[in-house]
Image (cartoon, rainbow, N blue to C red):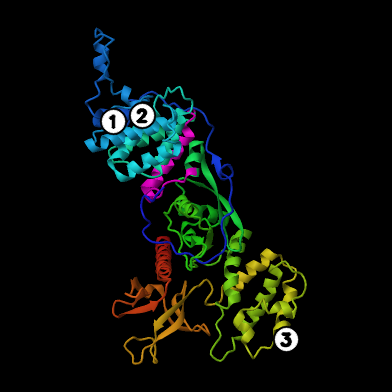
Amino acid sequence: QQHFLQHQQQQQHTQQQMSLPHHSLDANYMTEEPNSSGGGPSPSVTKYSLLQFAMQHFRNDQYTDSRVHSRDITRDHSERRTPSYADLVKWQGTPIRLPLLRLPNDLAPLALECFECILRYCGDIPHDPELTEVKCVYTVLMHCHKYLALRDEVYCQLMKQTTANRSACPDSAQRAWRLLSILAAYFGCSDALRPYLMEHLTSAASDRRRSCHGTAAVCLANLRKTARCGGRKNVPSVEEVTAVSAGRSARRQIYRLPGGAERVVNTRCSTVVADVIAELCALLSVESEAEQQEFSLYCIVQGDAFTMPLAADEYILDVTTELLKSGQPFYLIFCRSVWHFPLKREPAPTPLYVEVLFNQVAPDYLEGLLLEVPSNGVPMPEIVRDMARIAALLHRAADLTHVPAMKEIKFLLPKPALGIREIRPAQWVGLVQSAWPQIANLTPSQVKAQFLTVLSAWPLFGSSFFAVKRIWAEEGPHVEDSNPMWRDLILALNRRGVLFLDPNTHETLQHWPFMEVISTRKVRSEDGALFLDMKVGNLMQQRVIRVQTEQAHEISRLVRQYITMAQITQRDKRELN
């Protein structure tokens, strides 16, 4: 078991000490359709039938026109008959002696080996102890990965074996379809074969009288996904091959939500990250495709310091198979990574929507990341009132019904608030308890919604925060100034743009809206330090800002995502006008 293709970049992951619970194979995979025969029709002569393709592209040194045989009725029937095109596009239970297509001579033995693997996998010839079910699948996939010319050959072989299948093995046809579904999740075919392959799959999938129609529909979906996303990159696990071969093509994969809640999404051979995000967004009633782009799926691996979201076209089983094979504890978490659109208010958001966002925002709030404390050390009065109200809301969100006490209130305030000398602990208690009567009778879901509403008015709400170092001169952030020095800052990204914050007060030192961010570039120095260069400005005046951070890839991705969201919004406004 080895990689087909290396991923274009290493996934970086946040340090966590959790892993997915282990489930049995039967519990994880679900049956796609009844285990019954699906022999398929006799060869068709439609415009895009395999027979038509064979007459144009199959080798002509082993076929004769069937019309010749029908006329030559006086021939000695004991003489071995050369097969016709019609014979060679339908099932046969013995190995082929030549490839179906005109292949280079050095690929002919591999084509014959693939067909033998198909026969053994389908049960048409006895199993070889050295050539197991899984080994048959791996052999076909590896040959097709290494030699592009073999892909059309193997597709034609499987189309042949799913046409007029009369095998004595009752599962032969169904297993041929299942092997075809695996192949379609990995590789496309040539432009010449595509219409014929699509016709073969579509005709089978659309005919509900045929027992194979469900698996044919899976083949069709896998092939379309491969055309869009490029196909699977890693060999399937033994468990996946065994499950698909037995007709269980949907795996019950666990996805975590902020706060620790879990949801199960049926994950198939060709399921990509975008599919999972769309399904989980549907649970939140986030139906707009633009809004769905604000959500991401992260793979958290134990021991990794940083994490990156999985790419939208990345195959889920490619990710999980590699991690399970290496024995690394991991879990997949769904969260909102971009906050371009405002909170949903009309119609009323679903409880799960509120729960997910609440659990994502609350830790940042309590850590003090959203709180801006001016240099004089005293927040504005309305901010103090908000913090007191939020403390009462958090108390009720924990489903507590008693008045908050002093020993509880210190855990309900942002950490920096406890250091404000002008507000003593007794004053905080009075402020929080005075806000309690208006909150005591609300449900936990209602107070969580109010928590989000109050915080959404704060300037740093919906921000992603990154610790960075930046050259900062005594006079300001200009490289050309005298006495430049590296300074620790917080870089915040939100719908307002790119902000550099004081690490202690969280006051905004510099701000660029995304319309002024021209480009980003990642640079690694000779000593291994990672930098991010951001070109900002306008057509008349531009400058490059360099920051040092190990999270340069994630910052660059989020900047691009925010710019894309802003462009989508502007386009939609123009279309409305």
Query: From the viewer's perspective, is residue 379 above or below residue 210?
Result: below
The secondary structure that most of the magenta stretch takes on is helix
Distance from the alpha carbon under mark 1 to that under mark 3: 86 Å
Distance from the alpha carbon under mark 3 to that under mark 2: 82 Å
Q: What is the x, y in percent for residue 439?
A: 72, 72
Residue at 65 percent across and 67 percent down: it is: 448
> First in sequence: mark 2 or mark 1?
1
The crowding category of the residue bearing disc 2, from other C-alpha atoms within 10 Å (few below 14, some 14 to 19, many at least 20), is many
Secondary structure under the numbered disc 3 in the rendered image? helix
Secondary structure under the numbered disc 1 in the rendered image? loop
For this orientation, the residue located farthest to the top is: 74
Q: Nearer the viewer, residue 271 or 423?
A: 271
Q: Quadrant of residue 529?
A: bottom left
Distance from the alpha carbon under mark 2 to that under mark 1: 10 Å
Task: Kindly report which numbered mark, 3 or 2, lies closer to the viewer in this rendering.
Answer: 2
Q: Amino acid at mark 2?
A: Lys
Residue 156 is left or right of residue 385, and the answer is left
Q: Amino acid at mark 3?
A: Ala
- Whether the magenta-drawn stretch holds residue 417 is answered as no
Q: Which quarter of the rendering shows the C terminus?
A: bottom left
Q: Which residue is mark 3?
A: 426
Q: Quadrant of residue 120?
A: top left
The answer to whether residue 196 is visible is: no
- Range of residues picked out in magenta: 209-238
Label disc, if present, on residue 160 of the rendered structure: 2
The answer to whether residue 480 is visible is: yes
Label disc, if present, on residue 100 of the rendered structure: 1
Q: What is the x, y in percent for residue 89?
A: 33, 26
Residue at 67 percent across and 65 percent down: it is: 446
The reply to whether callout 1 and callout 3 are in contact (CB within 8 Å) is no
